């Protein structure tokens, strides 16, 4: 920076060349004059203060090891949704969070949306296995017998 300005280039010309606003170049010059190269070093942007503490985050993540239909949570189905998580966070921690943001927040922590596999009413796993083992082969054999033989 010093080399450009010491060679007689005005801040407006430097700004135009770099595609910046003149005020930005002047601010850089001021920082350089006050602190040298350190004044021009990149400074990380902080961003907003997190709404949740590390302890609260750990508690929220622990919920996903349990079923949302348990009495502790009281939901009617076995599906965790962003809306449900947001509701629990607001109730238990008095922190409001957008459910769409929560879905991304959870995905970043390895928790993805999961749909419950729907089963018919009266589902009986043993009966289904028996049917596949005994009935289905019988149906296939009967079908093969009914097909005309090619000559």
Image (spheres, rainbow, N blue to C red):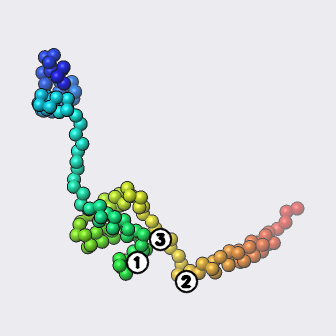
Residue at 50 percent across and 73 percent down: it is: 118
Asked if the residue at tag 3 contacts the one at tag 2, i.e. Cβ–Cβ closer than 8 Å, the answer is no
In the image, taking residue 115 as reference, residue 144 lies left or right, namely right
In the image, taking residue 36 as reference, residue 149 lies left or right, namely right
**Quarter assignment of residue 145:** bottom right
In the image, taking residue 10 as reference, residue 135 lies left or right, namely right
Give whichever of discs 2 and 3 has the lower sequence position: 3
Give the residue number, with chain letter if any, for mark 1.
69
Q: Which mark is residue 116?
A: 3
**Quarter assignment of residue 20:** top left
Closer to the eye: label 2 or 1: 1
Q: Residues within 10 Å of mark 2 (few under 14, many from 20)?
A: few
Asked if the residue at tag 1 contacts the one at tag 3, i.e. Cβ–Cβ closer than 8 Å, the answer is no
Give whichever of discs 2 and 1 has the lower sequence position: 1
Give the residue number, with chain letter if any, for mark 2.
122
Query: What's the distance in space between the residues labelled 2 and 1, CA to CA?
Result: 20 Å
In the image, residue 79 lies at what x, y percent? 41, 71
């Amino acid at each position: 920076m010093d080399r450009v300005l010491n060679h007689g280039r005005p801040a407006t010309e430097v700004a135009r060349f770099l595609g910046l606003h003149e005020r930005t170049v002047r601010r850089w010059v001021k920082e350089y004059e006050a602190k040298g190269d350190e004044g021009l070093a990149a400074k990380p942007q902080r961003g907003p203060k997190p709404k949740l503490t590390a302890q609260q985050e750990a508690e929220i993540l622990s919920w996903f090891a349990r079923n949302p239909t348990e009495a502790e949570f009281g939901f009617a189905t076995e599906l965790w949704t962003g809306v449900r998580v947001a509701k629990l966070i607001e109730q238990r921690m008095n922190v409001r969070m957008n459910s769409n943001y929560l879905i991304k927040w959870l995905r970043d922590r390895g928790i993805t949306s999961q749909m419950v596999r729907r089963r018919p009413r009266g589902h009986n796993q043993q009966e289904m296995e028996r049917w596949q083992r005994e009935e289905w082969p019988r149906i296939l054999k009967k079908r093969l017998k009914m097909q005309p033989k090619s000559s």
